[in-house]
């Protein structure tokens, strides 16, 4: 499992963000990530909890809060500036 995947899922879980998980068969599951491990993601929705195996996931997406996205963009911009000046 990649560090990027862990970080992405963990941020969505901590923010209690509503996520959309699109499965390989085209079905979409919406809810909040309750937990995840190497092989699966537990999603809580109005209909209860759903255990989704990662090998069946095509895409995971969620909208970040504007303030957080703006702060991250500023941080990335300053890191790029530091890299160019080095």
Image: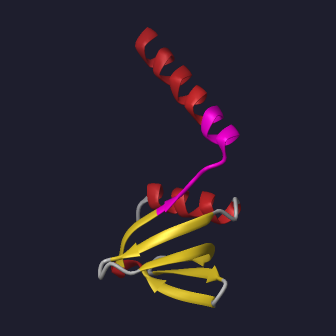
Residue displayed at 67% across by 84% down? 46
Q: How many marks?
A: 0
- Where is residue 3 shown, x and y percent of the image? 46, 57
- Up-down relation of residue 34 to residue 84 (above or below): below
- Up-down relation of residue 64 to residue 26 (above or below): above
Residue displayed at 61% across by 61% down? 12
**Extreme top residue here?**
85
The magenta segment: 61-71
Magenta stretch: includes residue 26: no
Is residue 28 something one can see in this rendering?
Answer: yes
Q: Nearer the viewer, residue 45 or 40?
A: 45
| Residue 26 located left or right of residue 30 | left
- Up-down relation of residue 27 to residue 64 (above or below): below
- Where is residue 29 shown, x and y percent of the image? 49, 78
Q: Quadrant of the N terminus?
A: bottom left
Q: Nearer the viewer, residue 38 or 29?
A: 29
Residue displayed at 46% across by 72% down? 21
Q: Nearer the viewer, residue 86 or 31?
A: 31
- State the colouring used for the structure image: secondary structure
- Where is residue 9 shown, x and y percent of the image? 54, 64
Residue displayed at 60% across by 35% down? 72
Is residue 86 something one can see in this rendering?
Answer: no
- Up-down relation of residue 80 to residue 63 (above or below): above
Q: Quadrant of residue 86?
A: top left
């Amino acid at each position: 499992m990649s560090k990027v995947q862990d970080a992405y899922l963990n941020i969505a879980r901590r923010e209690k963000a509503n996520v959309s998980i699109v499965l390989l068969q085209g079905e979409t599951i919406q809810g909040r990530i309750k937990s995840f491990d190497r092989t699966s993601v537990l999603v809580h929705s109005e209909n209860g909890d759903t255990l989704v195996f990662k090998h069946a996931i095509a895409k995971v997406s969620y909208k970040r809060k504007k303030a957080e996205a703006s702060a991250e963009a500023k941080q990335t911009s300053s890191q790029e500036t530091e890299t160019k000046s080095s």
